[in-house]
Amino acid sequence: MRTVTGRTDRVVVVGAGLGGLACALHLAGSGRQVTVLEREPVPGGRAGRLGVDGYEFDTGPTVLTMPDLIAEALGAVGEELHDWLDLTPLDPAYRAYYPDGSTLDVLTDTTRMAAEISRVCGPREADGYLRFVEYARELWRLERTDFIERNLDAPTDLITGNLLKLLSGGAFRRLQTKINQFFRDPRTQRIFSFQAMYAGLAPHDALAIYAVIAYLDSVAGVYFPRGGIHAVSRAMAGAAEKHGVQIRYDTTVTRVETVNGRATGVLTADGDLVPADVVVLNPDLPVAYRDLLPAAPQRRLTYSPSCVVLHVGSRQAYAKIAHHNIHFGRAWKGTFDEVIRRGELMTDPSLLVTNPSRTDSAVAPPDRHTYYVLAPVPNLHRAPFEWRGDLTQRYTDQLIGTLEERGYVGFGAGVEVIRAITPAEWEEQGMAAGTPFAAAHTLFQTGPFRPSNLHRDLSNVVFVGSGTQPGVGVPMVLISGKLAAGRITGEGR
């Protein structure tokens, strides 16, 4: 494994996102002197917080899986997860709604889930589910140690005994093809393959290795931290500061200073030069190269679709929904083709609706509710729509109309607060192509083919976050923090 050369005593981490904070905790646990510079007044990066008139919204991810990865980062400095976070397992993890009017609860207890699938789709489909769970569980076991929680420098690093097992198990076939081996009902096929969108691909194009995302979502369990996902950021930042990490908020880094092929520190917008033996960059990787580093030719990346998120504070409550709700449109493959291939807005959208206030009433005023509505849309490279014009209002109205058609009676009338976040805002926040989901996980943007977390020419510049290895999603970003720290400490070879 390639590692940072030279001294590594003083480390500056630019950005207090989840990856940067995880890296800082692992480095603090190894005895490094760590300074984190964050441009915002709070930690979290994409996992930030928006407060409006007594309503509190997570600005980024809302689905939390694999809390043991948070525990691992906290454990690097001797802290216990339960001392910092109050986690509630969500039951159901999701509630799926289908165009025929049927619903399916996604339960992480496999016995109960098999019974639920049997009730909705029949016993043969339940048998397929149990076979899928065994397959996906083994897939996660094979991938985790050798390919996900490991720094990869070259394609030859993939050659292990587990690679042969993955090949023989069909892990490099198309995801939808593999899913169809276990499920015949379109409803189960969708609920166990839609997660490919997290990786920036349609299920028909993604590799079957990404069935592990469905495993983490649907089997390993989904949790809600009291205070929202942003509470994870606050907990990690608090633990880091407790153990000597200096976090400077409201501090914008404008440039990485270099001499003779090495970073010597970073320059802030206030003109302050912060010296460092190692610089870790948490901004979106292409943006970090563009804005903070000396000019260097960069490979052309394919980006994931983006999304429009509506943050809604409302007088309306809906007793029949769950914490996380997925509303599938009638179209399936055509929907992905619209967003990914043709760069069009969905004509029959599938939506994620999260209702955090039903689990944590503190995120809304009394007798009020918060809703987070996510609709996939093309990124700005695929379709440079003018979101700063009236398109945002028109699309917002369209989404509210779709929700009302799908059972959210009076949704528009109940709105007290609404904020729409579009690809234009994601781009302003420093996300390449206006997408919060980074580079897509195509074959040649996965594993050792994904942009490296160690700079090619600057031997002491390290990257962390979803744009580098292992990739997108809260679990992968937390792992990226450990991998980045490993480049500096030499641990985890």
Image: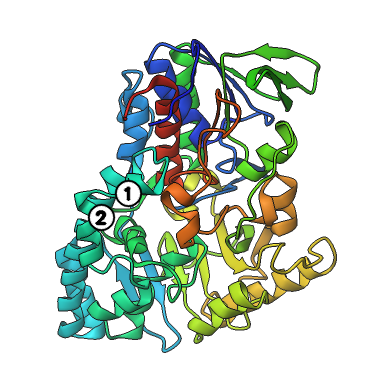
Please, what is the three-letter code of the amino acid marked with disc 2?
Leu
Spot the residue most to the bottom. Answer: 100
Residue 278 at what x, y percent from top left? 55, 19
- What residue would you read off at disc 1? 158
Left of 459 or right of it: where is 266?
Answer: right
Is the Cβ of the residue at disc 2 closer than 8 Å to that at disc 1?
yes
Please give the name of the residue rendered at 38% of the width and 28% of the height, measured from the top-left corner: 84
Pick the front one: 229 or 38 = 38
Please give the name of the residue rendered at 39% of the width and 27% of the height, measured from the top-left corner: 486
Q: How is the image coloured?
A: rainbow
Please give the name of the residue rendered at 42% of the width and 30% of the height, measured from the top-left corner: 2
- For the question of whether residue 402 can be seen, the reply is yes
Secondary structure beneath disc 2? helix
Secondary structure beneath disc 1? helix
Quadrant of image for the C terminus? top left
Quadrant of image for the N terminus? top left
- Calculate the distance from the C-alpha at mark 2 to the C-alpha at mark 1: 7 Å
- For the question of whether residue 236 can be seen, the reply is no
Of the residues under marks 2 and 1, which one precedes in the sequence?
1
Where is residue 337, by image quadrant? bottom right
Where is residue 390, by image quadrant? bottom right
Tell me if mark 1 has few (under 14), some (14-19) or many (20+) residues whose alpha carbon lies within 10 angstroms of its own: some
Residue 347 at what x, y percent from top left? 63, 83
Q: Which mark is residue 278?
A: none
Please give the name of the residue rendered at 39% of the width and 73% of the height, measured from the top-left corner: 96
Please, what is the three-letter code of the amino acid marked with disc 1?
Leu
Left of 112 or right of it: where is 218?
Answer: right
Residue 131 at what x, y percent from top left? 16, 71
Pick the front one: 163 or 331 = 163
- What residue would you read off at disc 2? 163
The number of callouts visible is 2
